[in-house]
């Protein structure tokens, strides 16, 4: 059954998508729901595609052991809301998950599995290329945000 992608259609990262892309995606995306506190995936889980957030909030965090400590502490990386994607690195590099993804509130998610993406690459290369462009723009945006945070840290430490 096709999923409802209207929340994404007017968002800036998706403006290059054509109506045919939305139709194809609505047929391959798998809808799931997550309750507040549910793990979508954990650090080092195998990656198998990525997620679109239809509604809710997803916290991306990493457990780190601070220098001189023995107990891991949660390091918040970001909180994402409706219209965002996450887990995209697994689709790009095939490596295990690099952080935890946890529902901050009840959420509806759409998952694009690796196999379905690869099928799109073979059968609908233009759509797959637009998805790939979305992933690149998202990754660049997140790298720039990390760079800005380092600039802020450097400012406060000097």
Image: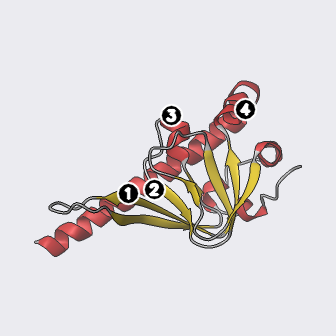
| Residue drawn at x 75%, y 31% as measured from the top left | 124
Between 118 and 141, the residue placed more toward the observer is 118
| Cα gap from disc 3 to disc 4, whole angstroms | 17 Å
| Cα gap from disc 3 to disc 2, whole angstroms | 20 Å
| Residue drawn at x 73%, y 56% as measured from the top left | 32
| Cα gap from disc 3 to disc 1, whole angstroms | 22 Å
Mark sitting earlier along the chain (3/1): 3
**Residue that label 2 marks:** 141
Question: Given this view, does label 2 or label 4 mark the residue nearer the observer?
Answer: 4
Where residue 54 appears, as percent x and y from the top left, is: 71, 63
Q: Residue furthest left?
A: 158
Mark sitting earlier along the chain (4/1): 4
The C terminus: image quadrant: bottom left
Where residue 113 appears, as percent x and y from the top left, is: 67, 40
Question: Circle 2 sits in a helix, a strand or a loop, which is it?
Answer: helix
**Residue that label 1 marks:** 144
Question: Circle 1 sits in a helix, a strand or a loop, which is it?
Answer: helix
Horizontal side of 63 relative to 118 (left or right) equals: left
Badge number at residue 120: 4
């Amino acid at each position: 059954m096709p999923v409802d992608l209207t929340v994404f259609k007017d968002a800036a990262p998706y403006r290059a998508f054509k109506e045919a892309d939305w139709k194809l995606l609505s047929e391959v995306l798998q809808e799931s729901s997550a309750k507040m506190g549910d793990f979508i995936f954990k650090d080092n889980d195998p990656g198998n595609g990525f997620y679109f957030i239809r509604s809710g909030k997803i916290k991306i965090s990493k457990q780190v052991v601070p220098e001189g400590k023995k107990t891991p502490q949660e390091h918040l990386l970001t909180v994402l809301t409706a219209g965002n994607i996450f887990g995209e690195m697994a689709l790009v590099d095939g490596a295990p998950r690099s952080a935890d993804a946890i529902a901050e509130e009840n959420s509806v998610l759409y998952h694009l599995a690796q196999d379905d993406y690869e099928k799109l690459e073979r059968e609908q290369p233009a759509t797959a290329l637009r998805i790939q462009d979305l992933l690149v723009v998202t990754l660049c945006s997140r790298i720039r945000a990390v760079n800005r945070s380092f600039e802020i840290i450097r400012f406060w430490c000097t």
